[in-house]
Amino acid sequence: MAARRVSSLLSRSLSASSPLLFRSQGRNCYNGGILRRFGTSSAAEELISPSVQVSHTQLLIDGNFVDSASGQTFPTLDPRTGEVIAHVAEGDAEDINRAVKAARKAFDEGPWPKMSAYERSRVMLRFADLVEKHSEELASLETWDNGKPYQQSKNVEIPMFARLFRYYAGWADKIHGLTVPADGNYHVQTLHEPIGVAGQIIPWNFPLLMFAWKVGPALACGNSIVLKTAEQTPLTAFYAGKLFLEAGLPPGVLNIVSGFGPTAGASLASHMDVDKLAFTGSTDTGKVILGLAANSNLKPVTLELGGKSPFIVFEDADIDKAVEQAHFALFFNQGQCCCAGSRTYVHEKVYDEFVEKSKARALKRVVGDPFKKGIEQGPQIDSKQFEKVMNYIRSGVESNATLECGGDQIGDKGYFIQPTVFSNVKDNMLIAQDEIFGPVQSILKFRDVDEVIKRANDTRYGLAAGVFTKSLDTANRVSRALKAGTVWVNCFDVFDAAIPFGGYKMSGNGREKGIYSLNNYLQIKAVVTALNKPAWI
């Protein structure tokens, strides 16, 4: 499959209702005493009731949906209103023990790692078919639990989800070792073996895609899994678990536990019978996870953590395209994206034009009920994240950045925030240093290439970056100089199943997606056999 660009897929999914994108419908934006119309489908309007039924709220352990050992549950909330969608089983240390025990039995005694790689791939392909068959239910649950636009869930993320599993199904029977020449009369071969029981902890911003990034390669390599969902968004993982059972995945191969980080997450990270751990989330939590893994059985850990990605616009760039891409790079998924282009560096010669056009684009952004057609932005995930974003907006104002537009809540229900643009941002401001994880664009000015490279790299993060220029020399020079795991040139958020993703510095270690992700779930064994009078060596 050709590289899928999230931005182009999303724009096509909205094209049928594109006039709505430019209609002023609601909130006003206050900026320096001037009232500006804000392009929003008012959050106060009547909300659409999702048609999907929540049918799975229990833990998936050893092929069965079961209550937590304690019998306790916790609510998962609708970000549009803050109201309860359902009560979900609250897993803790005992449930992690049960899940790990089931996974260990499935790996040591069950059919999955002993099944031919071709048969494993067929299970994964059947699962992908079921995902497409039930795409509306999955998309509805994802939007309801997370708040992202339904058109994004249905037309972008569900196809990507299925594509990722088909990609890894294709790898299952292509994993093999080597025959290695060695000095002396020896036959040497390497075996690529499944690592065993994989513990996986996924975040709330892309529940289904992060499920695929982790579960796909682990299954392709023949491992068993204990996956902990984010407590904010457990519903689609359980539904996917049901579909995997329908596809013929043996009991205990995939176990899913919903619960909280300090209890279920910490228990999984420190469990002595978990052979490998993968975590996506904040850098601070990643440090805790790494310590727990090291202090238990020294299990290897893959970390995909925070980011503060630079988006660099040079003076020769197509400004209109750069404005649109910078807007998408920041505001996509309500700004709740680890690789968001959250430091927009613009050359001084085109800075004023870029700021004015970026402000105009933000004012046209359509915010509202994510189940409605034409909506570009839904609510933030919960009250905690909402308050965090609002605090950063206040910090930007207090540090004398220029608030071009936005900066306020939309409506009085749910967690909707106006698309916010700051100009005259300095590198030492918190909004230019910290991962905000919200719809707040910070636009900074630069003079030359050497300066912007130095400033772009002056961060503890190194997840991604964007470069906009018509000069091939500039693109090559800057992309090689930036300390980031992914550099997009004249594009942004291009995610294909085959493209590796991961960070430098405190954005984590290891790579997900692509051939490199398989290494996370394999052990390499060297087998050396003495040869007696070989005909050749």
Image (spheres, helix red, strand yellow):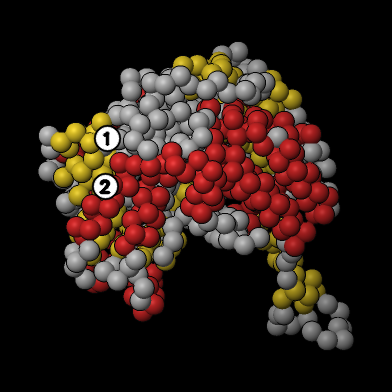
Res 31 visible: yes
**Which element type, helix, strand or loop, lies under badge 1?**
strand
| Residue ID for mark 1 | 37
Q: Amino acid at mark 1?
A: Arg
Task: Identify the image quadrant of residue 73.
Answer: top right
Q: Is residue 104 above or below residue 341?
A: above
Sequence-earlier tag: 2 or 1: 1
What is the crowding at mark 1: few (fewer than 14 residues within 10 Å), some, or many (at least 20)?
Answer: some
Q: Residue at 77% across / 77% down in the picture?
A: 186
* Residue type at the position of mark 2: Lys
Q: In this picture, is 450 found above or below 70?
A: below
Residue that numbered label 2 is attached to:
359
Q: Position of residue 86 (x, y in %)?
A: 56, 17
- Quarter holding residue 142: top right
The spot of residue 463 in percent (x, y) is 41, 55
**265 or 146, nearer to the observer:** 146
Q: Nearer the viewer, residue 371 or 263?
A: 371
Label 2: state its secondary structure: helix
- x 42%, y 66%: residue: 489
Badge 2: how crowded within 10 Å, few (<14), some, or many (20+)? many
Q: Position of residue 344 (x, y in %)?
A: 29, 55
What is the quadrant of residue 523 in the picture? bottom right
Give the residue at x 38% y 26%. 42
Q: Position of residue 330 (x, y in %)?
A: 37, 48
Give the spatial CA distance, label 2 vs label 1. Answer: 12 Å
Q: Nearer the viewer, residue 352 or 487?
A: 352
- The reply to whether residue 146 is visible in this rendering is no
